[in-house]
């Protein structure tokens, strides 16, 4: 598949023709710029109020840890509630925390742990915002433009990364960290205004939202039953774990290895951003020429070179060149991971899948930032960076055992074949458990193909919420096969069928084609009941379907 095909032959800039995407993209530039200025201010402030390498590295960890801890819950919220309202709440919260951080810095009240507390709360806002925003990209632009939109978001972030850290370093050097924190607070206003003016037309919900616990469980189950997404999560975790060493220890590199100040630190981060912009445009070309696995291997190897260069170079210009290579590798890997998850996941669970991807990547970063900080404190920054470079090479080689899936287009639009059946019993939405059987007649010659299709059917059923799935063969008539599964409640049964996609429909069609009966396979739905729940006085009414069933 070439790059043009991936974006529907519309070009890498096609999403910018969409007014809504363009407005958010521009507003995000201001927000990202403020976030990078804040990051420089926080990292440099920690170097001045604490001389400990592990405390400096914890600044990076305190921002990424909330994303690891809370992204799944945020993804569940993104899939079950109005994403616009969620993003407004997150952005207003981050504005308030950033303003408070600026006031504390101006008043001279910051301590190392208070600074980490503020950056942790900002990270919580990012954790709440990101799944909703990333899932919204697929709502704003057509599916064929999603890879280009993800790349443009990366370009926008890295445009600001190329200048934001240098601006942040200049602000810190000229006016102090409080001014950097205040600039970050102001940067949220543009995206808050864009969200308030946006009036999305989300499709109406025909079923009530799941509870937070149910929604999180459904997201975990979907990813666990989708092996391709699991591979992306594993490789993303390894990349985050090893690559974060460079960013986490860069303030110390700027101060001690290349003997610079806050402005040098900002310029080095800017070099990383310039490389990332190049990587975002390079990604489009590489996707048309190389497999996903080879692109990721190149990214791991290139970042290993960047880490080794950062460890060994005593010159800021040489370190900057290495960081440019690292920035390109960073975008190549992370944008590919993101696009793979987006295009492998239906809309009903995309927020949770992206959240779990973020949990893997940022969890790796949080663990890595703490680990590399401790190692740098014990053995030196140079040693920690060289070990990280070795880890990056090992992460690339992990593709031999867990390669990324080849890119292929799946039609993940809702199948929309199911119609709620007429019932002879007065069911409540939470009545259950519900037991379902589907009876097929399969000729002996078709049995191998039937069992192969049923193995895929089992995975799909369980992925979408079915329990106790079983396949049974009739002993009296061996051509009769019965598929059995349960859902916890009637509303879970309806939700189960809403989740089916057109790609799933291919398996359904295969099974129907193998069915040798005169009509469609026979489907029966039954309510599971224990005799102790049915008082004898009401048995007759229940059998006639007149007895109201207790929700269960």
Image: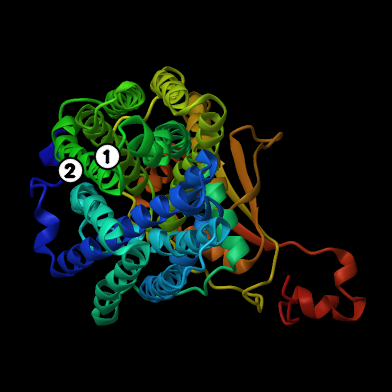
State the residue at coordinates (82%, 77%): 540
Image quadrant where one finds the C terminus: bottom right
Which image quadrant for residue 255? Answer: top left
Q: Position of residue 82 (x, y in %)?
A: 41, 74
In the image, taking residue 344 as reference, residue 465 lies left or right, namely right
| Residue 258, above or below 213 | above
Q: On the image, which quarter does residue 281 sit in? A: top left
Horizontally, residue 320 falls left or right of residue 471, namely left
Choose between 94 and 313: the one closer to the eye.
313
Nearest the eye: 272 or 89 = 272
Q: Position of residue 447 (x, y in %)?
A: 52, 27
> Which mark, residue 277?
2
Looking at the figure, which quarter contains the N terminus? top left
Task: Inspect this view and state whether residue 513 appears.
Answer: no
What numbered label is drawn on residue 331?
1
Say above or below: 330 vs 524: above
Q: Secondary structure at mark 2?
A: helix
Please report contact status of discs 1 and 2: CB closer than 8 Å, yes or no. yes
């Amino acid at each position: 598949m070439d790059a043009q095909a991936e974006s529907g032959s519309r070009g890498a800039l096609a999403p910018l023709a969409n007014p809504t995407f363009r407005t958010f993209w521009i507003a995000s530039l201001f927000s990202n710029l403020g976030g990078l200025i804040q990051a420089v201010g926080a990292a440099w402030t920690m170097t001045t109020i604490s001389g400990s390498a592990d405390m400096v590295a914890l600044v990076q960890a305190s921002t990424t840890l909330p994303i690891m801890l809370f992204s799944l819950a945020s993804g569940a919220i993104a899939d079950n509630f109005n994403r616009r309202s969620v993003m407004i709440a997150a952005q207003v919260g981050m504005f308030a925390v950033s303003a408070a951080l600026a006031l504390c810095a101006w008043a001279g009240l910051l301590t190392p742990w208070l600074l980490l507390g503020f950056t942790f709360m900002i990270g919580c806002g990012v954790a709440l915002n990101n799944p909703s925003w990333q899932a919204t990209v697929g709502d704003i632009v057509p599916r064929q433009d999603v890879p280009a939109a993800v790349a443009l978001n990366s370009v926008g972030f890295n445009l600001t990364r190329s200048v934001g850290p240098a601006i942040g370093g200049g602000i810190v050097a000229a006016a102090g960290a409080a001014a950097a924190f205040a600039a970050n607070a102001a940067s949220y206003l543009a995206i808050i205004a864009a969200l308030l003016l946006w009036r999305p037309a989300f499709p109406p919900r025909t079923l009530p939202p799941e509870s937070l616990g149910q929604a999180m469980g459904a997201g975990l189950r979907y990813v666990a039953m989708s092996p391709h997404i699991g591979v992306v999560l594993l490789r993303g975790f390894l990349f985050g774990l090893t690559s974060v060493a460079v960013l986490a220890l860069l303030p110390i590199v700027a101060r001690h290895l290349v003997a610079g100040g806050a402005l040098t630190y900002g310029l080095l981060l800017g070099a990383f951003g310039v490389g990332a912009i190049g990587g975002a445009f390079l990604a489009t070309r590489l996707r048309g020429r190389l497999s996903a696995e080879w692109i990721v291997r190149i990214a791991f190897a290139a970042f290993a070179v960047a880490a080794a260069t950062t460890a060994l170079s005593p010159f800021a210009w040489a370190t900057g060149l290495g960081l440019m290579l690292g920035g390109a590798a960073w975008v190549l890997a992370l944008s590919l991971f993101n696009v793979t998850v987006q295009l492998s996941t239906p809309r009903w669970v995309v927020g949770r899948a992206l959240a779990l991807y973020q949990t893997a990547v940022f969890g790796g970063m949080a663990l890595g930032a703490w680990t590399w900080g401790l190692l740098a404190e014990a053995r030196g920054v140079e040693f920690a960076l060289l070990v990280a470079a070795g880890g990056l090479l090992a992460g690339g080689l992990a593709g031999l055992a867990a390669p990324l899936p080849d890119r292929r287009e799946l039609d993940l639009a809702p199948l929309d074949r199911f119609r709620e059946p007429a019932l002879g019993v007065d069911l409540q939405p939470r009545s259950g458990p519900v037991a379902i059987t589907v009876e097929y007649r399969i000729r002996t010659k078709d049995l191998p193909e039937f069992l192969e299709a049923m193995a895929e059917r089992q995975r799909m059923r369980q992925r979408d919420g079915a329990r106790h799935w079983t396949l049974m063969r009739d002993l009296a008539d061996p051509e009769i096969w019965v598929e059995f599964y349960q859902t916890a409640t009637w509303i879970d049964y309806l939700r189960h069928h809403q989740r089916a996609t057109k790609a799933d429909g291919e398996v359904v069609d295969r099974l129907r084609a193998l069915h040798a009966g005169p009509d469609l396979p026979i489907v029966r739905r039954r309510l599971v009941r224990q005799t102790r729940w049915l008082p004898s006085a009401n048995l007759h009414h229940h059998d006639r379907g007149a007895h109201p069933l207790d929700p269960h």
